[in-house]
Amino acid sequence: MTTNLTTSELLSAGTAQLAARSETAHLDAELLLAQALGTTRARLKSHPEAVPDAAARTRFEALIARRAAGEPLAYILGFKDFWTLRLAVTPAVLIPRPETELLVERALALRPEATARVLELGTGSGAIALALASERPQWQVTATDLSEEALAVARANAASHSLSHVEFIHGSWFEPLGGRRFDLIVSNPPYIGADESELATRELQHEPRAALSPGADSLQSLRAIIRAAPPHLEHGGWLLLEHGSTQAADVARELVVRGFRHVRSQRDLAGRERMTEARWG
């Protein structure tokens, strides 16, 4: 980029570089320029004539290059907003998606009581567990993950939001929990088949494969959770699962066969069936 460019000119140049790579090129460039300058988007807009120094321009160019190469914006910025929380994210965790907020909404709706024992399986960044804990301070929230690196990110996020009543446990699904039982179990497990073209997209290639795909059988993790969940649910407890937009019928069938009742799928804001809930007992 040319030297002595104003903030507005830098933003235009960055947007042009990302136009072919991102559907939100201007927003991405704004966020990256704010990051490079250590300022806010509002400041960028109110002072478009400002001329950043050479070091700031170099930082911005490096950030734009990473985004143009397909690295997810959240990993470049180091955070992602989810529910009402700003969460740190690293390549060790899946980036929280807006559609996953549906799990949070349904959990809160299905359990209006002030107290509850709640479990999240495969917590990653801690997004679901921490969103629930922030809304229900008296809930006892437990979260498991097989990745120690992911748990380190989740614990840091809990500390940054002073959510000390969330317990993080290392282990696969229910294995580290013994005979503990819960009123609610929620999970966004891996559900993309290893041979599905979605995994080949540039951005998903940057995210942890184990958090995206269980292998050749896209239902493997969902099926494992459904089959193992009943001994860990109180009578009348709910299991809530996020899944792919074409998997609702298969997930519902697995739940019914296992003996769950009140099985129903919920649609996200785009009208896709993205999660299924079921009651035990």
Image (cartoon, helix red, strand yellow):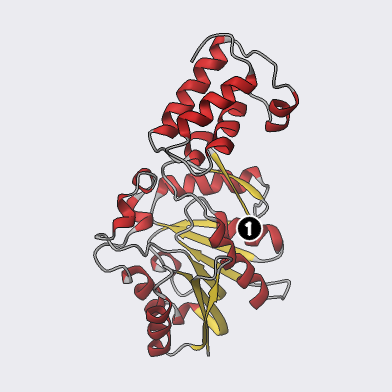
* Disc 1 target residue: 131
Specify the quadrant of the image occupied by residue 55: top right
Point out residue 173 in the picture as x, y percentages from the top left corner: 40, 65
Residue shown at 58%/38% (left/top)? 27
Point out residue 141 in the picture as x, y percentages from the top left corner: 59, 63
Nearer the observer, 149 or 46: 46
Residue shown at 67%/26% (left/top)? 39
Nearer the observer, 198 or 88: 198
Q: Is residue 277 above or below residue 22?
A: below
Nearer the observer, 179 or 64: 64
Residue shown at 59%/66% (left/top)? 269
Q: Is residue 228 above or below residue 88?
A: below
Q: Secondary structure at mark 1?
A: helix
Point out residue 248 in the picture as x, y percentages from the top left corner: 43, 77
Residue shown at 67%/46% (left/top)? 161
Nearer the observer, 221 or 171: 221
Residue 177 visible (yes or no):
yes
Residue 181 visible (yes or no):
no
Identify the residue at the far right of this view.
46
Point out residue 217 in the picture as x, y percentages from the top left corner: 26, 69
Amino acid type at image mark 1: Ala
**For the residue carrying disc 1, how many other residues have a C-alpha within 10 Å: few (<14), some (14-19), or many (20+)?**
some
From the viewer's perspective, is 51 left or right of 235?
right
Counting every numbered tag in the picture gives 1
